[in-house]
Image (cartoon, rainbow, N blue to C red):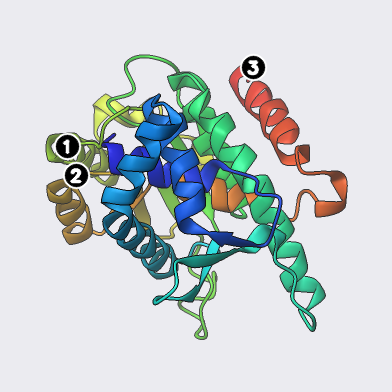
Amino acid sequence: MTVQQQIISWFYDQEFNRAWLDFDDHLIDAVQHTQDRSRSSAEEYASNNSDRLWNDLRQQIAEDSVRGLYPTFSEITAGVKRLFWNPGFFPSGISKGERHKRSRIRSRIHIIKMIRSLNPNQYEALSVLACKFSGSSNYCRTPDGGEFGIDFFAMIPSIGISHLFDGGGGPIRIVGQSKKHSNRVPRDRIQQFTSALNSVHQRSEDVSNIIPRWFLRQRGPIVGWFIAHNGLQSGARDFANRFGIIHSDSRDIAEILAMSRTWQPSDGVNAPVELIRREINEILSQ
């Protein structure tokens, strides 16, 4: 992770004590904590790099919007480096539903931190849990070893306005792989996953013993889902998009879990983390 990425990540990891933030003031704290600098050194670095890092944060906010993630920050104005921190920003007239969403993204901070602590097996179980929280009717993690790059199977209902796409033709059948890598996943890993996905389509002998019966009984479309902790390299993303493979990172998974109706904001900010850990343990014990 680059210095810039570390600093932007610091902003997303914080629970601030006020709704509006002065970027430059908090930037000094971010530099000091992420780069292990003295206060004076952090002030100098922040002063020299403020405009660039401000634009980096604004770009991240824009990317979040494109991805459909509920925004952590709202920009007050581009001319003044100030932000609203949405988990603590409840303007007059805000709806009850919107208030609940902002409480949920406060829990999202804790979910993301928890995800970082997971080992690879737990991360695979987390991927299965994301299927469950996405409405999956059937889901399972494949046995350890010899799974040909397939970590989980699931069925998720499809929704459409015609009889062909409203679930009548069968749910979407998910073939998934998850990678808890510290770096972005390269293209060759996606290519290998595509090969495994083709084996499922063809019901090849090398994967037939790991495909669940409930998966085979359905007739809905088969779709690949690649979950990578820190996302994909640009070439890997392009390859996945060309072959219609869904791809996501841990922030996407945290969004699914944070917005799930299996818990309520009134349960407390750490409630989803406790629930997720229990569910992961249950999946691993099956």
Q: Residue at x 71, y 50 (%)?
A: 17
Asked if residue 201 shows in the view, the reply is: yes
Please, is residue 83 above or below residue 234 in the view?
A: below
Residue of label 2: 233
Which marked residue is nearer to the observer: mark 3 or mark 2? 2
- Secondary structure at numbered mark 3: helix
Kind of residue at disc 3: Ser
Please, is residue 52 above or below residue 9 in the view?
A: below
The image position of residue 5, as x and y in percent, is 33, 42
Kind of residue at disc 2: Gln
Q: Residues within 10 Å of mark 1 (few under 14, many from 20)?
A: some
Q: Residue at x 63, y 38 (%)?
A: 110
Q: Which mark is residue 285?
A: 3
The answer to whether residue 67 is left or right of residue 156 is left
Residue of label 1: 186
Q: Residue at x 12, y 49 (%)?
A: 235
Between the C-alphas of marks 1 and 3, the distance is 31 Å
The image position of residue 284, as x and y in percent, is 59, 20
Q: Residues within 10 Å of mark 2 (few under 14, many from 20)?
A: some
The image position of residue 213, as x and y in percent, is 50, 37
Say whether marks 1 and 2 touch (CB < 8 Å).
Answer: yes
Kind of residue at disc 1: Pro
Q: Earlier in the sequence, mark 3 or mark 2?
A: 2
